[in-house]
Image (cartoon, helix red, strand yellow):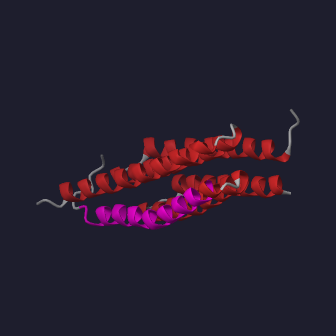
Amino acid sequence: MNHLIIAVLIVLGALWILIAAIGLLRFKDLYSRIHAATKATSLGLLLLIMGVAVYFGLWDVTLKSVLIIVFIYLTSPLAAHSIAKSFKDDNSKKML
Amino acid sequence: MTTGVLDIAVLIGFIFMLLALLLAFFRLVKGPTMHDRIVAMDLMASITMGFILIYSIVINKSLYVDIAIVISLISFIGTVAISSFLRLKNTKK
């Protein structure tokens, strides 16, 4: 029963990250790509880290997992906002 | 060693992660602007975190969760550094 929960969490997390990669490849605009790559990756990593915390079951691993989840959910919108602001303020729009 | 449901789940997770890494690498090669490449690098760091988290289940060592903390810190700092560098460079004049 415990292994079944871990298996479902791992497969769902990997599936969400795969969906994020498909969205990053298939969308046509930069803002749509940021939208796909930020939110789906946050949810996928949340599910994977929950799977790892359920698998080990120790208190220190659970504490580190909570810290990783809080850090990801604090910093992932900041990184996406920084990229979008840097693209909006770009005057040259140079094709590098 | 009998193959339980967890081994099949780990295998499916590795396959999905590898496909996601390949698609993000296509966007990294093809991306029209520099900002697309930054987004692709951010996604590839997250995929690497997922790889290491699944691998910590495979080899049954809880020490590998620390690597995920370090990768998330370095990925955030690198993304903000490159995007703010581009913003300062392109809006100078």
Q: Is residue B58 above or below residue B88?
A: above
Q: Is residue A68 magenta?
A: yes
| Residue at the spot 47% in from the left edge and 62% down from the top edge | A71
Please identify the residue farthest to the right as the structure is shown.
B2
Answer with the quarter of the image where residue A50 lies: bottom right
Q: Which residue is rendered at x = 19% and y = 58% of the image? A: B88
Q: Is residue B34 left or right of residue B50?
A: left
> Magenta residues: mostly which secondary structure?
helix
Whether residue B86 appears in magenta in the rendering, the answer is no
For residue B12, which quarter of the picture? top right
Is residue A16 in view? no
Bounds of the magenta segment: A61-90
Task: Pick whichever, B67 or A62, lies toward us.
Answer: A62
Q: Is residue B22 left or right of residue B75?
A: right
Quadrant where the N terminus of chain B sits is top right
Is residue A92 left or right of B16 when viewed as pictured? left
Which residue is at the far top? B1
Q: Quadrant of residue A4?
A: bottom right
Q: Is residue B2 left or right of residue B31?
A: right
